[in-house]
């Protein structure tokens, strides 16, 4: 009986946490056709690493606008980044002369960056109700 009570208590605690997660959608504009888009949502601890809280990979996107549903995400601070491997070489291409990215990028805010971004520069606070994050793609080629 004690085990059943413990399990019921754990489930009761887990349900409100899941109910607090809100749907996150990334609305992209200015997408170029082809290649692969990588959309990711990362916490401070995950930032610029291989791990992510949510994400999606879109193969051969069409040009124009695109909405990417990242599912339910617990409220908190996240960085939203998009990389478009537009030439499909599976590498993040950088111009060797200028050091500027050649592949498509989207993040908030991209204007004014003069080097790799910090988490605090890109931070978006996701409320319990969820959020739609509008981003514009930027391409150097």
Image: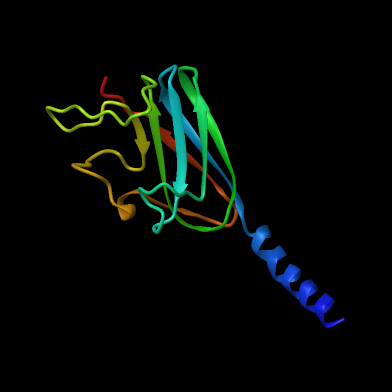
| Residue depicted at 45% across the width and 34% down the height | 38
Horizontal and vertical percent position of residue 76: 49, 59
> Who is closer to the viewer here, 89 or 24?
89
**Picture quadrant where residue 71 is located:** top right
Horizontal and vertical percent position of residue 24: 55, 45
**Residue 104 left/right relative to 100:** right
| Residue depicted at 46% across the width and 46% down the height | 41
**Picture quadrant where residue 92 is located:** top left
| Residue depicted at 36% across the width and 19% down the height | 87
**Residue 3 left/right relative to 88:** right
From this viewpoint, which residue is outermost toward the right? 1
| Residue depicted at 23% across the width and 30% down the height | 94
Q: How many marks?
A: 0
From this viewpoint, which residue is outermost toward the bottom? 2
**Residue 58 left/right relative to 44:** right
Horizontal and vertical percent position of residue 78: 44, 53
Q: Is residue 40 above or below residue 14?
A: above
**Colour mode of the rendering:** rainbow
- Give the quarter of the figure containing the N terminus: bottom right
Q: Is residue 49 above or below residue 17?
A: above
From this viewpoint, which residue is outermost toward the left? 97
Q: Is residue 106 above or below residue 41?
A: above
Horizontal and vertical percent position of residue 30: 40, 23
- Give the quarter of the figure containing the C terminus: top left
């Amino acid at each position: 009986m004690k085990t059943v009570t413990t399990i019921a208590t754990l489930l009761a605690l887990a349900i409100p946490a899941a109910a607090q997660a809100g749907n996150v959608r990334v609305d992209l504009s200015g997408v170029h056709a082809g290649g692969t888009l990588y959309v990711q949502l990362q916490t401070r601890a995950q930032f610029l690493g291989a791990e992510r809280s949510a994400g999606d990979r879109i193969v051969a996107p069409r040009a124009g606008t695109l909405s990417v549903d990242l599912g339910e995400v617990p409220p908190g601070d996240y960085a939203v980044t998009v990389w478009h491997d537009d030439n499909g070489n599976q590498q993040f291409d950088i111009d060797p002369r200028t050091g500027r990215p050649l592949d498509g990028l989207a993040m908030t805010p991209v204007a004014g960056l003069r080097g790799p971004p910090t988490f605090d520069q890109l931070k978006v606070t996701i409320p319990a109700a969820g959020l739609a994050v509008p981003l514009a793609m930027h391409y150097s080629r």
